[in-house]
Image (tube, grey):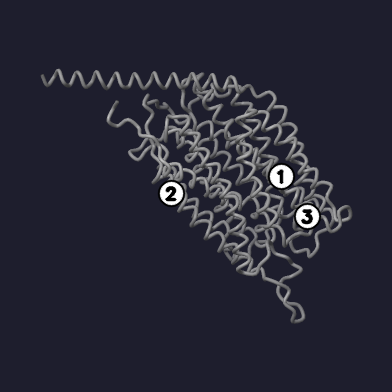
């Protein structure tokens, strides 16, 4: 055995890789849940400007997601292929994360739009690079499937922790400043000497403090993978000839499992992102629960944390396709149906308990989507490697991120256009019924439609449990053969050196 033969990973390596999953989920979830409220209610840009902001940002970040995988795949430095990307994107993403929640004090609406185009857009682009490098690192940390599975397990667990931390940080910060989520024009400043609640300046300060805490954690946890996870070279020394290989793209387009999962991830992202970005506004206006927003979100994510371990056990027993179908049919669809029919006239004082119970159902279903997509991605990467003998994990992760980014842009644009058509105005003390109903149907009506379409493609998904096991056995045999060839080369080199000395 060679002296530099890779050692087995230790608990410290698993822990460091898992902690690296917190930054993206913490900051990304905070943006997904609260940025729409912040930008519309506190900064007070118009829905039309917000549509320009979110659509432009998602288009740019989607384009970067398309190319970043190829750039990572062609990177080769003395510090490794993946770690330079992790180091750079962790620090720069943290800086942009703070400034996208910073209120620049610019009165011009155009000036505000430019500020957030730079920092909100920059954050999304850099976060794409960070996520791709982090996901790709698992392929270079170990060649053992069992160790890779453990790395992904820790990553998934800590990603959910990041989701919960995002809600806890917001809750703690707003409680510290005695502020409510979003700016309420009915309780701003004083009227006839009576205090009507926190001012908009207080809201701005609370958001900036929460952003500072989140950015600090981004740097701290983001660098753990750089310092605590090994990055090993491919023993076959495979290199890619160009940054944008046309032949490799053609092979991907012909790879049916990749195409099916590409569509499945896009549809699921459309439903999940639409739900996340509009939930806070729906709770605030449709259900008149502005004081309960953070608590409902906390319950939702806690349910996802608990459920993800249960879904993991179900995956081993009944397989990927059955689990994801159960998650949609038994949890996500009933959850959205409950939000569509829930009204105070129908439920009376039971409305709030009903919303909390529905959140448990939705969180369990969303937890299923997280783990199912993760393991299905690994299956497709293995299948592609077996059929083409090419290790292109960063490229595949990049293209899947591209599909999600496109759906995010469509969701953001459509949501803002609908709000504008419904006469949404942040300065209105009470929103009209058209806004309340628009938020209900966008948030709870759109996801079920795309989930049903996704079920069709899940049924057509070609990788079964049997084919997955055959792929694993074939890859194990190929890796064993490569190890034998490496040892044979090293042995022959050592024998030649001995003969020269003699």
Indicate left or right for 273 with 333 as reference.
left
Q: Residue furthest right?
A: 345
Query: Residue 106: x, y in percent?
Result: 60, 64
Q: Which mark is residue 223?
A: 2
User: What residue did someone put label 3 on?
Assistant: 353
Query: Residue 250: x, y in percent?
Result: 54, 22
Query: Residue 366: x, y in percent?
Result: 67, 42
Query: Residue 155: x, y in percent?
Result: 52, 42
Q: Nearer the viewer, residue 212 or 467?
A: 467
The image quarter containing residue 476 is top left
Quick one: label 3 or label 2, which is nearer the N terminus? 2
Number of the front mark, 1 or 3: 3
Could you tell me how far apart the alpha carbons at marks 2 and 1 are, in whole angstroms?
Answer: 33 Å
Q: Residue at x 73, y 65 (%)?
A: 184
* Vertical position of residue 58 compared to residue 430: above or below: above
Quick one: label 2 or label 1, which is nearer the N terminus? 2
* Count of labels in the image: 3
Q: Which mark is residue 442?
A: none
> In the rendered image, which quarter contains the N terminus?
top left
User: What residue did someone put label 1 on?
Assistant: 362
- Per the image, label 2 sits on a secondary structure element best described as loop
Could you tell me how far apart the alpha carbons at marks 3 and 2 are, in whole angstroms?
Answer: 41 Å
Could you tell me how far apart the alpha carbons at marks 1 and 3 are, in whole angstroms?
Answer: 14 Å
Q: Around disc 1, counting alpha carbons within 10 Å, would you say few (fewer than 14), some (14 to 19), or many (20 or more)?
A: many
């Amino acid at each position: 055995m060679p002296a530099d033969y890779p050692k087995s990973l230790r608990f410290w390596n698993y822990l460091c890789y898992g902690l690296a999953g917190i930054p993206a989920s913490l900051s990304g979830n905070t943006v997904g849940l609260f940025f729409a409220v912040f930008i519309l209610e506190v900064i007070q840009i118009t829905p039309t400007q917000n549509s320009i902001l979110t659509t432009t940002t998602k288009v740019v970040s989607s384009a970067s997601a398309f190319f970043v995988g190829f750039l990572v795949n062609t990177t080769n430095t003395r510090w490794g292929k993946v770690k330079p990307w992790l180091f750079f994107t962790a620090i720069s993403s943290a800086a942009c994360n703070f400034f996208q929640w910073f209120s620049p004090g610019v009165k011009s609406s155009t000036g505000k739009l430019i500020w957030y185009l730079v920092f909100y857009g920059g954050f999304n682009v850099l976060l794409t690079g960070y996520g791709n490098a982090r996901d790709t690192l698992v392929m270079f940390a170990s060649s053992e499937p069992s160790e890779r599975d453990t790395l992904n397990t820790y990553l998934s667990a800590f990603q959910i922790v990041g989701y919960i931390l995002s809600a806890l940080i917001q809750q703690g910060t707003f409680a510290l400043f005695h502020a409510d989520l979003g700016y309420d024009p009915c309780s701003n400043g004083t009227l006839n000497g009576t205090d009507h609640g926190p001012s908009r300046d207080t809201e701005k300060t609370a958001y900036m403090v929460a952003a500072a805490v989140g950015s600090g954690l981004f740097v701290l946890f983001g660098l753990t993978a750089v310092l605590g996870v090994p990055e090993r070279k491919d023993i076959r020394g495979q290199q890619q000839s160009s940054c944008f290989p046309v032949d490799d793209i053609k092979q991907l387009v012909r790879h049916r499992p990749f195409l099916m999962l590409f569509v499945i991830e896009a549809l699921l992202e459309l439903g999940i992102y639409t739900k996340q970005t509009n939930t806070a506004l729906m709770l605030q206006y449709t259900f008149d629960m502005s004081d309960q927003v953070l608590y409902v979100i906390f319950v939702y994510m806690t349910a996802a944390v608990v459920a993800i371990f249960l879904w993991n056990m179900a995956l081993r027993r009944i397989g990927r396709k059955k689990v994801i179908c159960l998650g949609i049919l038994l949890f996500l669809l009933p959850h959205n149906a409950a939000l569509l029919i829930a009204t105070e006239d129908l439920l009376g004082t039971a409305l709030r308990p009903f919303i909390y119970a529905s959140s448990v159902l939705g969180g369990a279903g969303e937890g299923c989507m997280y783990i199912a997509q993760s393991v299905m991605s690994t299956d497709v990467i293995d299948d592609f490697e077996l059929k083409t003998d090419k290790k292109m994990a960063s490229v595949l992760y990049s293209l899947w991120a591209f599909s999600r980014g496109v759906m995010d842009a469509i969701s953001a644009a459509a949501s803002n256009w609908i709000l504008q058509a419904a006469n949404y105005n942040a300065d209105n003390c009470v929103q009209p019924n058209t806004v309340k109903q628009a938020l209900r149907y966008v948030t709870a009506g759109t996801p079920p439609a795309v989930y049903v379409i996704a079920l069709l493609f899940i049924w057509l998904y070609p990788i079964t449990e049997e084919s997955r096991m055959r792929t694993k056995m074939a890859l194990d045999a190929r890796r064993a053969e490569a190890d034998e060839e490496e040892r044979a080369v090293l042995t022959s080199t050592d024998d030649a050196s001995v003969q020269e000395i003699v």
